[in-house]
Image (cartoon, rainbow, N blue to C red):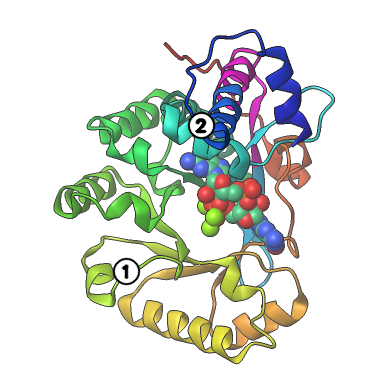
Amino acid sequence: QADVALYQAKNAGRDTIRFFNPEMQATIDARAAMEAALRDAIRRRELQLYYQPQVNRDGRITGAEALLRWLPPSLEPIPPDRFIPVAEETGLILPIGAWALAQGCARLAGWQKEPATADLTLSLNVSARQFHQPDFVAQVWGQIKRFEIDPAKLKLELTESALIDRVDEMIERLHRLKGLGVGISLDDFGTGYSSLSYLKRLPLDEIKIDQSFVRDITHDQNDAAIVRAILAMSRSLGLDVIAEGVETQEQRAFLLRHGCEHYQGYLFGRPGPIEDFPAPLAGHGVQPAEIFTN
Ligand code: C2E
Ligand code: MG
Ligand code: MG
Ligand code: MG
């Protein structure tokens, strides 16, 4: 919590609304401090995308997932789980998400200029709030045109939470996104509440097996059974599958044995700045643009 405390001290002079519940007030203060800190971070361009490789059965890199990091000078990188919830609540996720989309498309444009990297895919996480914007499809199309990228190499990762409200409208929106030529990936699969009949209605290209199932795959019979079932189901629905959080050769061997095609995890590479991405693949995308907030 050191980083939060630090920013809180800095903002101590600000007026706050008083509630009679001190615990509640503490939470609100912490949130307000986090929001203020996040606004400062955006202004100072401290947000960056890290890239984590995704590989095929042979271990060859087929693409990457872009993962947001907050890099305050001289502090440890702050992981997204610490600030994305606040960004979601305050709406800051909208400018941040728009910026990440532009950054990702710029990266793909860089890759697509070089034969060695032209086939790489890039996966971007899209938050529920971002996806629910009425002009989201237009935003995606705008960036595809702006950077003249092959949309087939762009994958948008959504979680079930983005797809539980206004289901018909959101399914229609997914169809329009697919109409642009981009891929749709369902993130954290297995952690939500989707029934199979619901899943069947979604125009998906890929599902990502959540790392919580992969973690104990080699010694927990239930997790092993769940993962086998997900792999079998995806095969029969014609969906690509990628396993998240693959850390050991044993996990990889299990997944290989049961027909998993794609892998992501520390075993193959940790998320890192683009400069750390395997040399010929790093490429030269357009570098940090500004995040515009109102
Ligand atoms: P996610 O999309 O499910 O991303 C996978 C997470 O697993 C990442 O955490 C990644 O660093 C971590 N991971 C990858 N391989 C391994 C492994 O082998 N072992 C373990 N223990 N972990 C592994 P990270 O980067 O902290 O991101 C957390 C979540 O934050 C993401 O989960 C995603 O939901 C969200 N997020 C990240 N970037 C963005 C973004 O640009 N926009 C939005 N809306 N959400 C984002
Ligand atoms: Mg993801
Ligand atoms: Mg995930
Ligand atoms: Mg997650």
Query: In the rendered view of the protein, which quadrant contains the C terminus?
Result: top left
Residue type highlighted by circle 1: Ser
User: Pointer 2: what residue?
Assistant: 100
Total numbered badges shown on the rendered structure: 2
Say if residue 116 shows up in the picture: no
- Which residue occupies the extreme right position in the image? 74
At a point 52% along the width and 81% down the height, the residue shown is 227
Disc number for residue 235: none
Front residue (pair 244, 261): 244
Query: In the rendered view of the protein, which quadrant contains the N terminus?
Result: top right
At a point 67% along the width and 35% down the height, the residue shown is 283
At a point 69% along the width and 67% down the height, the residue shown is 59
Secondary structure, mark 1, is: loop
Which quarter of the picture shows residue 83? top right
Give how far across and how far down residue 264 sits, in percent.
63, 62
Which quarter of the picture shows residue 288? top right
As drawn, is 209 to the left or to the right of 201? Answer: right
Residue type highlighted by circle 2: Ala
As drawn, is 109 to the left or to the right of 280? Answer: left
Q: Are marks 1 and 2 in contact (CB under 8 Å)?
A: no
Disc number for residue 194: 1
Give how far across and how far down residue 29 sits, in percent.
58, 25
Magenta range is 34-50
